[in-house]
Amino acid sequence: MSVVSFKGTREGLVITLGEGAWREVLNDLMTQLSRPGAQSFFQGARVFLETGARALDVTQIEELIALLAQYRMTLVAVSEPSSQEAFNRVRTSLLAPPEVMLAEETVPSQSVARDETYALLVHRTVRSGQTYQYAGTIVVIGDVNPGAQLVAEGDVIVWGKLRGVVHAGAAGNDNAMVAALVLAPTQLRIGHLIARAPEQKRTLYFPEVARVRDGRIIVEPWTET
C-alpha cells in the first residue's frame, strides 16, 4: 500500500507523506515517480509537501530535494512548521557564498548499498581542484568548473554547467547516466567507458543526458530520465 499520495493544484503538485519509516517513504516516492509515463507528467513540477505531524530535519529535506531533482521537480514549501524551518535553512545555503575548500579536497565515499534513494546534494559551484566522490548519486545545484571532478557509483545530475571531469557508474555500472543543463565535460566516463569532449567548440547548448548504448556513450537531449 502506498504511503505517498499526489494531488495537482493550480499552484503546483501537492505530495502528502503518510506514516512509516523515512526510508520506506522515500522508496515509495521514488517508485511512484519512476513509473512509466510519470516522469513526463511530473517533470518541472513545483512541489508543496504535506507531512502531517511528521517533522523533517535538514538531512531528510536534502535527501528529498535530491530525489525530486532527479525528476526535475522543485520543492517550494513544507506544511509542518519545523520542517519548513529546516527547508529554509537548506534553501538559504543556495544563496550563501561557497565554503572555502582546499585544492584536491575530496568528499570521502560512503559505504552504502547501491540504492537510487541515496544521493549527495551539492548546493554550490564545484571549483577547479575540488573532487566529490560518493557511493550513490551526485546531484549538483550549480556549475562544475573545468578542473573539478565528480565521481559517483550512481548517476551524476548537474543543474547547471558541467565542464569538469565526471565519472558515473564508477563501480562498473554501465546503466548509470550523466545529465546537465549544459553538458560540456572535459572528460566523461560511464562505467568502464570513456568519452572526451569534441575538439570543435559548440555555439548552442541545451539540456542533455549521456548514457551507454550498444557499448558506447551517446549524448541526447534531456527530455526525460
Image: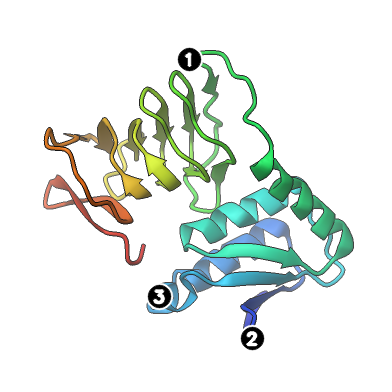
Characterize the local packing of mark 1: few (<14), some (14-19) or many (20 or more) Cα atoms within 10 angstroms: some
Position in image of residue 161 (x %, y %)? 39, 42
Q: Percent x, y for residue 68?
A: 55, 61
Looking at the image, the residue that sits furthest to the front is 203
Q: CA distance from mark 3 to mark 2?
A: 17 Å
Asked if the residue under mark 2 is in contact with the one under mark 3, i.e. CB atoms within 8 Å, the reply is no
Residue type at numbered disc 2:
Thr
Residue pointed to by mark 3: 40
Residue in the image at 64% along x and 80% along y: 11
Instruction: Find the distance from the CA under tag 1 to the CA under tag 3.
Output: 38 Å
Which residue is identified by label 2?
Answer: 9
Answer yes or no: is residue 179 visible: no
Would you name the residue on which mark 1 appears? 104
Q: Quadrant of residue 206?
A: bottom left
Residue type, label 1: Glu
Give me the C-alpha separation between circle 1 and circle 2: 46 Å
* Amino acid on which disc 3 is placed: Ser
Dot 3, how many residues are within 10 Å of its Cα: few (below 14), some (14-19), or many (20+)? some
Q: Nearer the viewer, residue 168 or 161?
A: 161
